[in-house]
Image (cartoon, rainbow, N blue to C red):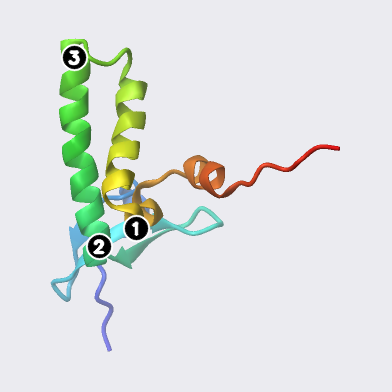
């Protein structure tokens, strides 16, 4: 049985880089907990989420250049909220760790 991932090692690429493997399927660079990069098969929902996020980000950055938003960080934050509002399942694929933790964090009542 042969390996289906791309020939070149994942450590040579940036995170979320998409390449076709030997088996003609698409793979994305992911990172393990010990910071080692590896090739992970790209799921159809993940591909859809990444594509919609990238498209929305380009439109929001264009609006930032027109002067609608104050900063590029604001345009990025609005992009996250717009995509996650439209597709809540995309939070697994496009959100940063900080955003995931703040969503799941429950406020504790102080005595």
Name the residue carrying label 2.
Answer: 45
Callout 2: 10 Å neighbours few (<14), some, many (20+)? Answer: few
Query: Mark 1 to mark 3: distance in Å?
Result: 30 Å
Left or right for 92, reference 46: right
Mark 2 → mark 3, Cα distance in angstroms? 30 Å
Q: Residue 89 bears which disc, if any?
A: 1
Q: Is residue 56 above or below residue 5?
A: above
- Of label 2 and label 1, which has the lower sequence position? 2
Q: Position of residue 70 (x, y in %)?
A: 32, 12
In-image side of 56 versus 16 (left or right): left
* Label annotation for residue 19: none
| Residue 97 seen from this side | yes
Against 43, is 76 above or below?
above
Left of 42 or right of it: where is 110? right
Residue in the image at 13% along x and 72% along y: 24
> Which numbered dot is residue 65?
3
| Whether label 2 touches label 1, CB < 8 Å | yes
> Alpha-carbon neighbours of circle 3 within 10 Å: few (<14), some, or many (≥20)?
few
Q: Is residue 67 above or below residue 24?
A: above
Secondary-structure class at tag 2: helix
């Amino acid at each position: 049985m042969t390996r289906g991932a791309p020939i070149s090692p994942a450590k040579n690429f940036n995170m979320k880089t998409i390449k076709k493997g030997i088996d003609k399927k698409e793979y994305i660079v992911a990172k393990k907990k010990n910071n080692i990069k590896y090739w992970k098969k790209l799921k159809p929902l993940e591909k859809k989420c990444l594509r919609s996020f990238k498209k929305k980000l380009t439109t929001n950055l264009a609006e930032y250049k027109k002067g609608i938003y104050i900063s590029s960080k604001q345009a990025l934050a609005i992009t996250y909220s717009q995509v996650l509002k439209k597709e809540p399942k995309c939070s697994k694929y496009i959100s940063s760790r900080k955003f995931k933790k703040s969503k799941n964090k429950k406020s504790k009542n102080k005595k």
